[in-house]
Image: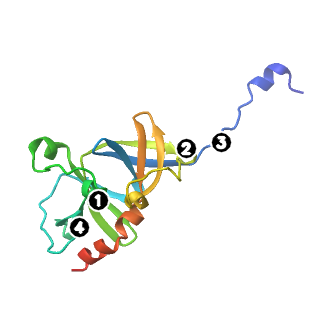
Amino acid sequence: MLDKKDEDTTPIEKTHEPMMRLITFHIANEIYGVEVCNVREILLINQNFPVPGAPDHVLGITNIRGNVVTIIDARKRFDLPEIDFSNPIYKESARMIVVEAGNETAAVLVDSVSDVIDVEKSAVDLSPKIKLNNDSRFISGVVSHSDGLVIILNVDKFLSDDELDMVAGF
């Protein structure tokens, strides 16, 4: 029989909450996140070649290790104020996040990349009351973090746009 002293030293099993790992980045004054499993790499801004007739948010295409990849300006995609990424101040911090979803790949141009964070999946609000015109379809949820609210990008919807399919198959 265990006495009271022995009961207190018995290890308690901890339940592990399912986690989500996000790469956080900035667009305008907001913090966004994308799941690490959707990110192939993060690059400095590459030379891009415009595609005639492409949607406004498509900066063009670029060559990344022999693959032609569409470059999407995240600011334009979300109808946020444009900045001149050729300006040395922005060019130093701006990055292209090469994301994949299914067979689709694109380089998303963002203002800067911050951190890799782990959040509990149960902490993600999957039905946030966000109104970003019609672009809220690109948001899969919101989570509170020590740096503030992180808006989670739904890469599948972001890359499955008919307009992007048109550019990829020109």
User: Label 3: few (<14), some or many (≥20) within 10 Å?
Assistant: few
Mark 3 vs mark 2: which is more N-terminal?
Answer: 3
In the structure shown, which secondary structural element does the residue marked by tag 2 occupy? helix
Q: Gap in Å between the C-alphas at discs 1 and 3? A: 40 Å
Q: Which label was assigned to residue 26? A: none
Q: State the residue in front, 152 or 30.
A: 30
Q: Which mark is residue 15?
A: 3
Which residue is rendered at x = 48% and y = 44% of the image? 143
Which disc is residue 70 wearing?
4
Q: CA distance from mark 2 to mark 1?
A: 27 Å
- Type of amino acid under label 4: Thr
- Mark toward the start of the polypeptide (1 vs 3): 3
How far is mark 4 from mark 2, CA to CA? 33 Å
Left or right of 82, for residue 120 = right
Nearest to viewer (mark 1 / mark 3): 1
Mark 4 surroundings within 10 Å by alpha-carbon count, few (fewer than 14), some (14 through 19), many (20 or more): many
Give the mark, 4 or 2, whose residue is nearer the N terminus: 4
Q: Determine which residue is flagged by label 1.
A: 77
Q: Which residue is mark 2?
A: 123
Mark 3 or 4: the one toward you:
4
